[in-house]
Amino acid sequence: MAEDGRMKDLLRRSRSPLYLQVACAIRSRIDSGEWVPGARIPSLDELAQEHGVSRITARQAVTSLVEERRLVRQQGTGTFVAEADPNQRLRMSTSWESLTRMIAGTSLDILVERREVPPPPLDDVPGRPAAAYQYMRRVHGRDGRPYAVLDIYLDQEVFDRAPDLYRSITVLSVLNDREEVTEGAQTLTISTADPESARCLDIAVDAPVALVRRHVLGAEGRLLYFANVVYRGDSISFDIDLVCKARKG
């Protein structure tokens, strides 16, 4: 009972809609392994009582997770944790080679495109900005499912050398094949989806996402590419090798 009271207090203090908060709590239980694939989750009445919300709110939370493919409804038997898809997550690592391998086979949809825009604010990005950039807002997907939305700034001169290629496949793949890349780096932070990103990625507002800022430099430190990327939280995993040196003596 004390635990239920603590949960209700946390929900009351949050500014997010109640159904999104309940969905986040359910999602956390799935991600932590508390509710494993194939497990039946509590009924709507039980979820409503546990979280101190109405049955309608509990239903909205479950529906949002069904739409995310985290839960599956089976008529007459209940709602179950969806089976994990081994190909669902893209494995991000810390090398240029692994990144270009990860995005192979990506499909894309260009939402917005503009020529000769100025560089974005780049206070924390090294390199010498180009005179102008090709801006593209794109959605990347795999197997018919969006996994990332990107705001890309590509050196206009570089874009104009192969516009059809840059419009049809991932920008990094083309850069890797056609340009002299001298440096690439990215930073990743964890956040939640804003309404526009949620719409593009077919997820709920406030669903977990990974925010990536990525840049690529060319010859003489020229900034060839800069992007802000929003990944679905359930679409990627991040791998880092930890090497421990043996102690002496």
Image (cartoon, rainbow, N blue to C red):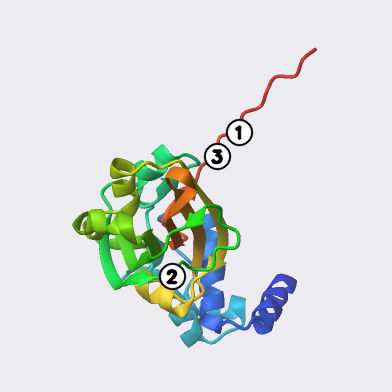
User: Where's the C terminus, which quadrant?
Assistant: top right
Residue 69 found in image quarter: bottom left
**Residue named by callout 1:** 242
**Residue named by callout 2:** 118
Q: How many circles with numbers are drawn on the protein?
A: 3
Q: Nearer the viewer, residue 222 or 154?
A: 222
Q: Are marks 3 and 1 in contact (CB under 8 Å)?
A: yes
Q: Please, which residue is most extreme toward the left here?
A: 164
* Residue type highlighted by circle 2: Pro
Answer few, some or many: residues within 10 Å of disc 1's Cα (few below 14, many 20 plus, some between 14 and 19): few
**Residue named by callout 3:** 240
Residue 131 found in image quarter: bottom left
Marks 3 and 2 sit apart, C-alpha to C-alpha, by 35 Å
**On screen, residue 214 above or below 132:** above
For marks 1 and 2 on the same chain, the one whose residue lies earlier in the sequence? 2
Residue 228 appears anywhere in the view = yes
For marks 3 and 2 on the same chain, the one whose residue lies earlier in the sequence? 2
Tell me the SS state at disc 1. loop
* Residue type highlighted by circle 1: Leu
* Residue type highlighted by circle 3: Ile
Tell me the SS state at disc 2. loop
Tell me the SS state at disc 3. loop
